[in-house]
Amino acid sequence: MSNYLLAWIVLIPFVSSVILGISYLYSIKVKKISNKFFTFLALLAPMSSFVLGVGFFFGLKNGVSEYLYEPYTWLGVDNYIINMGFLGDKLSIFMVLFITFIGSMIHIYAAGYMKEDEGYGKFFAYFNLFVASMLLLVLANSPLIMFIGWEGVGLCSYLLIGFYFSEPLNVVAGNKAFIANRVGDFGFLVGILFLFVYVGKLGFSYGALEEYVGIVPNHILVIIGVSLFIGAMGKSAQIPLYVWLPDAMAGPTPVSALIHAATMVTAGVYMVARFHFIYDLIPSVGVFIAYIGAFSALYAAIIAMRQTDIKKILAYSTISQLGYMFIAVGLGAYSSGLFHVFTHAFFKALLFMGAGAIIIALHHEQNIFKMGGLRKRLPLIYIVMLVANLAISGIPPFAGFFSKDEILLKAYEHQEYLIYGIGLFTAALTSYYMFRFFFVTFEGKNYISKNLEPISASMKIPLVILAIGATFSGFVGLPEVFGGTNMIHQWLSNWSVDSTHVENFKEIVLMGISVAAGLIGIAVAYVKFFKYDFNQDIKESGIIYNKFYIDELIDFLIIRRVRQISVFVSVVVDDGIIDKTVMLLSSGFINLGRRVGRMQSANTRAYAFFMLIGLSSFSLYLIFKLG
Amino acid sequence: MEVSFMSYILLAIILFSMGIIGVISRKNIFIVYMSLELMLNSINLMLVTLSKHFGNMDGQIMAMMVIAIAAAEAAIFLSLIVALYKLKHSINIDDYNTLKQKGTL
Amino acid sequence: MIDTIFLILASFALFGAGCMIMLSNTVHSALGFIVTILALAGLYALLDASFLFMVQIIVYAGAIIALLLFVIMFLNIQQSHAPKEPSKYLFMVVSAIIMMPVDYLLFKAFYTITDIKNFSVTPKDFGDVKMLGGELFRNWLLPFEAISLLLLVALIGAVVMARKKERA
């Protein structure tokens, strides 16, 4: 594979996005273009990128250590030179592979999901821009280039969450995502700036940074590590910047799938793994990250137990799963975290797509307590959702089991027993709330049967493919105890820290414990919800249902204060002081102008008189000055 | 009392002032014109006086030039007066205010 | 002797100028101006500028003022055409007062220009045609030619401007 093709992995979706955008404008302004054209263009892009990614994958597999393509110098000020660069190493190609693969699946699905939407072309233009930004983020060879992708992802999430912008609520959700991300971006930027100040002189690519990071004093490294992690919090929705993610459900369901599975939320995990050379030097920050992850996992799982909106449940489960990933990367087990990113992408995309299919079938009904009994009527969806739920609950042999169990194992190995306990407990909660949703949706009694909308084939095919993925993708990282070779660890050997291993027997016992936790959750859910009676009137309320009132707290503590300051500035400072001053000045000048204007009377003698006065004053000045 | 060159200068200054006073205080365009000519003449007197004082011919040459220009000016000025008079039927300099903006200001 | 002549000529010049700026009749003013011009011509003669003396009389008195009077008569300006100027004396006093510092400065400047208050002794032919002409064509040829060009332009311009407009 030639190096320059790396750039094309990013450029193809980007160019496709631009063409789609222009054609969409043409389509609405001039002449209607058929959706087939849009579909073709949109699907071509991630698939081509995927093919390129596979090519690079085999290149790396055959012994190339990394691909580096630096087409031109982006910024060059004196000694500070930043090249536009694309780095294809094992980590980034790994990310590229699943982003483009899951992305392609979601594209196919979206083609069915969005087929009757007015903004079909626009949707795919944003979609491909999203994929392009994410790929740029992943393939960048310096933090600054990464930041371009980082911001691009934020922008696209804003555009897509607010896609149905005629609803004010959706616009608010888009704003919320954007603003919460800005807070994180600020942290990321601060981290980059610190890095730049301390080692920027010696080059700013990852390679150079890794080489020279040792010259940064330790306390500065801590600041950098924490700042970068704040960026990751924003993108990957960890406490306390998670608030945007549940609201992001306002967008179309494929958008949720894309954000939650393939792009955006995994950016934070990727970033921490990418900066592993920093985090390796500051293990205390790593533990902090792991604790944030653990608490986010627990917290989101608790909230998810009481939600009624199908997409909200999935959103909180994403936060929860991201928490697991951060536990892993925080403890230095980057490959384990990325393994979970990988499996999570499959089953979470599957969950969202399945949920989207249910929503479509039920005429845009999102409340799970108004569904029920769908098992016989939507058998395909039932099967794939069962697979996905088993995967996320960590039941072997589905994908989630291997990755989640590995993370818990790592926590145990690092003797972070509190994190291990939280993780285990969260695993039980996860299977509980997932199967609560599952049983209420597909089983139950006394449900109201509604007419179902047919689900198109383009929505079904990716579901099947991803279901297969969600079943078998875990075997990629089959642990050694089962005779596997754990290919993920081998592939990402630079990113896997092999610490003390527990003996095989203990490992199997631990696995048994986590499987038991999952099964307990399922059992509780089965008892409570398998024969759920839809006639009973349920009113979900309480502190958990209301998400611990965090939104209200933020509203009270920050948003209202900021608004008060804004009103004060607007009314008192702006209207009262600045505007008045300006108006006074302007009216003063107008009056002055009027008065001076009278001098221009077109009277020659008056002009001569003014001239004489000037001459006379000048003479007076000279007389007194010169004596 | 010996007549020094300051006497001539003083006379020239007074004539110059009278020219300016005439320009400012009179409305009759012909008198304004003659006042301008008076100023030119007073400057000529200064030039000639200084020429005599320093024993240098350049002052007189300059005066010659001024007279020549004054002659040219006279031709132009008087033709302008003729044109203006045809337009406005007035020799009042205050009536020549076509450039004045008619309006609120 | 010269002092007396100077005083007489100076008073004529001032009288003429005064008449010119004060009289309301345009023709009377013009006559007053002629007096000033003639007195100035005499002063030129006192200052050894014999050629300028002639030029002053011929060009100013003979041509410019004659042309002026001709225009006045050509336009047939009556006393009734002359603008009413009720406050001209007030204007004169005011502008005379404003003029004071300028006069003072000028006077002071000339006073300090040289210590010698007497005229230098000039050669006998100072200021006559021969010397002036020689000076003019030796050292001032280019300005002289420029002036002649200017006169030509003025001639054409005057004709163009005073011409009767055939098409409005």
Image (cartoon, coloured by chain):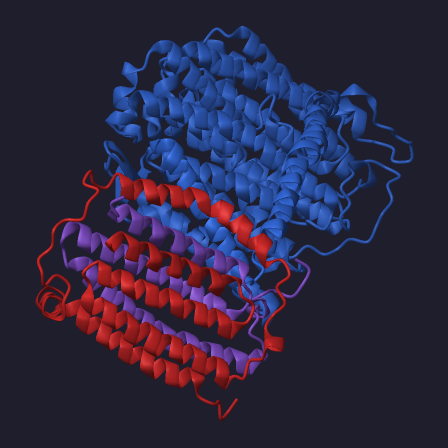
Chain colours: A blue, B purple, C red
Instruction: Decide if residue A621 is on the left or right side of residue A246.
Output: left
Which residue extends farthest front? C1
Q: Is residue A374 above or below residue A114?
A: above
Q: Is residue A74 visible?
A: no
| Residue drawn at the location 26% of the way across and 26% of the way down | A201
Q: Is residue C91 above or below residue C68?
A: above
Looking at this view, is B64 or A520 the one in front? Answer: B64
Tag count:
0
| Residue drawn at the location 87% of the way across and 44% of the way down | A448
The C terminus of chain A: image quadrant: top left
Looking at this view, is C57 or A566 the one in front? Answer: C57
Q: Is residue A33 visible?
A: yes
Tell me where residue A26 appears, x and y as whole percent: 55, 67
- Residue A397, located in which quarter of the rendered image? top right
Which residue extends farthest bottom? C166
Tell me where residue A341 appears, x and y as whole percent: 49, 31
| Residue drawn at the location 23% of the way across and 41% of the way down | C113
Tell me where residue A262 appears, x and y as whole percent: 51, 39
Looking at this view, is B62 or A575 the one in front? Answer: B62
Instruction: Decide if residue A342 is on the left or right side of residue A467.
Output: left
Looking at this view, is C21 or A462 the one in front? Answer: C21
Instruction: Decide if residue A423 is on the left or right side of residue A330.
Output: right
Q: Is residue A479 above or below residue A100?
A: above
Tell me where residue A610 appears, x and y as whole percent: 50, 52
